[in-house]
Amino acid sequence: MNLPKIHSITKKIMVALLGGFLLLFLLFHASANMLILRHDEGAWYSAFCHFMGTNWIVKIMEIALLGFIALHILLTLWLALTNRLARPVRYHQQQQSKTHSTSKLMVWTGILIFACMIFHFSDFYFVKIGWVKGEYMVETEKLQDPEMMQMMQFAQQMNMTPEELIDQLESESSMYVDENEDNAETETYIANLRSKLTVMDIINRAYEEGNITTDGKWLRHLSYDERQTLRKTMPECGVEPDFYYMAREKFKSLYIVFMYLIFFAVVFMHMRHAFPSAFQTLGLNNYKYNNIIEALGKIYTWLVILMFAAVPILVYLGL
């Protein structure tokens, strides 16, 4: 097999740099997840997700992050493959090595992490890009439509429901057009009113079921079909995935919690070696500081993993 000629040291440095960036990202991600534990109806976490989902700079960084993850995986597998091809015949007798045991599992834990990421993405990121259906939310002020409010007020004055008003407008449509005018404009107007009536039904259901935040800012727990209706009728309203609600619902299942804890255990093993290995590859280690780097790696790894694990565990316990 002929692979492009890139020196193994170059590949190792690239893997280390990308790995170091991903280590920092994991701390950022874990810190953001901790917002789920706030009992504020998801105000802080939803505000964070709203910023991350609407800021164009963040969107560019998001694409870059996915590219870094893919490149890190590709380079790691490439490095492992080239090392294997360089010595197709294994040592007859295994040498004793002082290398940490987790270093020998780096490729395998990396593959497992990639598989678990697909599971994780199907719960959240794929919902965001529309590949998987989820629960959604929308800002109430963006649903305020002057025409809708005018229709409701007129219906109240006529002592009719909005549905009855629209039916009457449709039956008497000839009164709203000139004899020589095409009825298409009126039919479009009536159809638009019916679409807005559907939006009113969505809003009313949310209020009746209590799916609105205390401050009245967000309508929550919208279905995929309701999302599609809002995006079609009011494309500027900006329907967003309700990640706070979805996370709290997901982590009520012991099976889901157990799966995520396995995921975090695999990430722990990968990070355990990645932290000191990055320093070594980049030539930042020193015999005077190796013990400190090793200790910092342990602290950092435990901190990040415990932060990740705390969310599903505490949510499952109802905290």
Image (spheres, grey):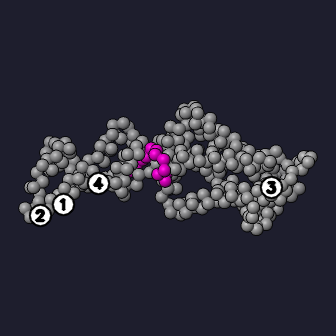
Mark 3 or 2, nearer chain start: 3
Residue carrying label 2: 181
175 with respect to 71 (left or right):
left
Query: Is 131 placed left or right of 115 in the picture?
Result: left
Q: Earlier in the sequence, mark 4 or mark 3?
A: 3
C-alpha separation, residue under disc 1 versus residue under disc 3: 71 Å
Q: Which residue is mark 4?
A: 145
Q: Position of residue 301 (x, y in %)?
A: 72, 46
The residue that disc 1 covers is: 185
Task: Label 3, secondary structure: give it.
Answer: helix
Is any atom of residue 201 visible in this view? yes
Q: Is residue 150 visible?
A: no
Q: Residue type at mark 1: give it.
A: Glu
Circles 4 and 3: CB atoms closer than 8 Å:
no
Residues under numbered marks 1 and 2 in contact, where contact means CB atoms less than 8 Å apart: yes
10 Å crowding of disc 4: few (<14), some (14-19), many (20+): few
Identity of the residue furthest to the front in this view: 1
Label 4 or label 1, whichever comes before in sequence order: 4
Which of the two marks, 1 or 3, is nearer to us in this view? Answer: 3
From the viewer's perspective, tell me whether residue 18 is left or right of residue 242.
right
- Give the residue type that dot 4 points to: Asp
Can you say which quadrant of the picture contains the N terminus?
bottom right
Q: Are marks 3 and 2 in contact (CB under 8 Å)?
A: no
Q: Which residue range is magenta in the image?
A: 128-139
Mark 3, residue position? 84
The answer to whether 240 is drawn above or below residue 14 in the figure is above
Query: The disc labelled 2 sits on which kind of residue?
Result: Glu
Kindly indicate the quadrant of the structure image that contains residue 37. Answer: top right
Quadrant containing the C terminus is top right
